[in-house]
């Protein structure tokens, strides 16, 4: 079974996001984490990079394309954006980039709040398997993970990250 | 033992129609309230619309008059991107003698995906739910004296919003309980969500003693009924009942059971006052209370839209 060191991947991601924010093309960019793994990452990046204000959290729930088959997921993963989106450079953060369908949904969700100046994607792992024309500007790791395996970020009580790899069913 | 499945739930226990709160598990109620919280925040967006019911047709079938409920269902369906068709059924085919099920069959042939039904006969939404195709969902928007489940849920949302937790509350429901489908839905919902004390307050003609069988405390004295209450739900005194022998007069009722600032002072200092509307000022509620600091009557209306969005999107996402 696949072994991944989430903490060292996070250190890579931190460097990558720092570079995206500093390259001069995204003045006053803000971090928006995709619920739930991406939101944990954004929260820690916000702190570790000493960024002002609070990170945003975005949920794909209201724009998912599998609503007809799966219905509404239980639980409340509400979008919370503590800043205006209109004209803003957005750096989206997520744990795993796979089919691209979640990214499509959250980009639509984002546009319900205004017209951002740009949207950039940074992820811990790009596992391949794309079904939409979507790409990450930064991925701490790019590796092919078979469709039979499910990859999820977990957060311990002390805030440390790890990856749970399970068999998909 | 032969168990008959609740017609509102599919084989996985998921909600496919909303016909009554009675018999629904706590988890189903809680999930709707949680989902409503998500939809409430849609009001803060530039685009106050989400695409969950895009391409679906929702038919508002009101066999009985309603302004508020029909309008909030319409707004809720439109916020979910559904196409909404309002049928003023009293003036249409039913008046020409068409049966209820023939009306439903014809509207189904027009590719209806959901029916929102209000009917003077208790049980009409059940009859419709039994006869629609598997992909069609039915919401009861009030049937006779039986149930008004979305009002019950929006009342629960309101209580949870202001009181956070159901487990220590005293809730007084005041007025014409016997004719009220709202009271019935509220009592079932409060019981399921674990409210320890529910009081039914009103005159003997409108609050019969056998209500105690529903697990409520019956109070014919208003002061006793609202003393120490956290939540007071006032019901509309239906004018059409005033002509009968049930009540002496509206003025007489107000004197005994109308909610005035003096009577409200008997409740907890942070008590909230609710009313399903439309309110009759000076009959069941004094203007000073209806417009006062304890009143949450208008927030109830706003929450009602989010709760109806939650109900419609929940049932539309579940397969029969």
Image (cartoon, coloured by chain):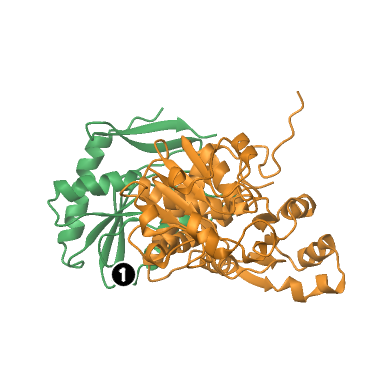
Instruction: Kindly give the residue lying farthest to the top in the view shown.
Output: B1
User: Which chain is assigned orange?
Assistant: B
- Front residue of this view, candidates B275 and B111: B275
Q: Is residue B126 above or below residue A108?
A: above
Residue occupying the far bottom of the picture: B91
Spot the residue most to the right.
Answer: B97
Q: Which one is nearer the viewer's eye here, B118 or B253? A: B253
Asked if residue A131 shows in the view, the reply is no
The subunit letter for the residue under badge 1 reads A
Residue A12, image x, y percentages: 21, 44
Residue B102 located left or right of residue A148: right
Whole-percent x and y of residue B116? 66, 61
Mark 1 residue crowding within 10 angstroms, few (<14) / some (14–19) / many (20+): some
Q: Is residue B142 above or below residue B320?
A: below
Q: Nearer the viewer, residue B172 or B300?
A: B172
Element at badge 1?
A: loop
**Residue at the (34%, 55%) spot, across then down:** A136
Give the residue drawn at x 62%, y 70%: B84
Closer to the camera, B222 or B181? B222
Tell me the quarter of the picture where residue B85 sits.
bottom right
Q: Which residue is mark 1?
A: A116
In the displayed structure image, the side of residue A123 where residue B56 appears, left or right: right
For chain A, give the colour: green
Task: Name the quarter where the C terminus of chain A is drawn.
Answer: top right
């Amino acid at each position: 079974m696949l072994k991944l060191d989430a903490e060292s991947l996070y250190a890579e991601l931190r460097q990558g996001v720092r570079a995206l924010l500093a390259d001069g093309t995204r003045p006053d960019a803000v971090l928006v984490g995709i619920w739930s793994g991406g939101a944990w990452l954004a929260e820690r990046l916000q702190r570790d990079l000493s960024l002002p204000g609070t990170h945003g959290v975005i949920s794909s729930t209201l724009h998912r394309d599998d609503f007809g088959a799966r219905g509404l997921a239980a639980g409340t993963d509400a979008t919370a954006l503590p800043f205006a989106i209109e004209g803003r450079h957005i750096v989206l953060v997520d744990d795993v980039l796979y089919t691209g369908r979640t990214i499509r949904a959250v980009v639509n969700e984002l546009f319900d709040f205004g017209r951002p100046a740009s949207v950039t994607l940074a992820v811990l792992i790009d596992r391949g398997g794309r079904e939409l024309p979507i790409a990450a500007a930064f991925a701490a790791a790019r590796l092919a993970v078979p469709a039979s395996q499910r990859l999820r970020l977990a957060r311990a009580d002390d805030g440390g990250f790890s990856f749970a790899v399970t068999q998909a069913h | 033992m032969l168990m008959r499945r609740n017609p509102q739930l599919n084989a996985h226990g998921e909600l496919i129609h909303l016909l009554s709160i009675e018999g629904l598990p706590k988890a189903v109620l809680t999930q709707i309230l949680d989902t409503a919280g998500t939809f409430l925040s849609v009001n803060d967006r530039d685009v106050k619309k989400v695409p969950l019911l895009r391409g679906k047709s929702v038919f508002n079938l009101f066999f009985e008059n309603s302004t508020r409920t029909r309008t909030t269902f319409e707004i809720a369906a439109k916020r979910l991107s559904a196409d909404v068709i309002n049928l003023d059924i009293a003036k249409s085919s039913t008046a020409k003698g068409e049966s209820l099920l023939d009306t439903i069959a014809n509207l189904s042939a027009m590719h209806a995906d959901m029916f929102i039904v209000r009917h003077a006969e208790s049980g009409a939404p059940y009859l419709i739910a039994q006869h629609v195709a598997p992909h069609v969902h039915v919401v009861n928007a009030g049937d006779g004296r039986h149930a008004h489940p979305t009002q019950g849920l929006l009342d629960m949302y309101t209580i949870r919003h202001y009181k956070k937790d159901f487990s220590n509350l005293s809730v007084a429901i005041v007025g014409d309980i016997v004719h009220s489908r709202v009271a019935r839905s509220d009592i079932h919902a409060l019981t399921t969500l674990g409210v320890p004390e529910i009081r039914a307050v009103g005159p003997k003609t409108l609050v019969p003693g056998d209500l105690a069988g529903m697990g409520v405390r019956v109070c014919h004295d208003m002061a006793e009924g609202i003393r120490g209450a956290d939540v007071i739900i006032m019901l509309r005194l239906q004018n059409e009942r005033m002509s009968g022998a049930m009540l002496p007069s509206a003025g007489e009722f107000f004197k005994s059971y109308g909610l005035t600032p003096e009577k409200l002072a008997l409740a907890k200092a942070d008590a909230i006052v609710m009313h399903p509307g439309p309110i009759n000022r000076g009959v069941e509620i004094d203007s000073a209370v209806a417009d006062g600091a304890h009143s949450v009557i208008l927030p109830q209306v706003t929450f009602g839209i989010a709760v109806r969005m939650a109900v419609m999107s929940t049932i539309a996402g579940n397969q029969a």
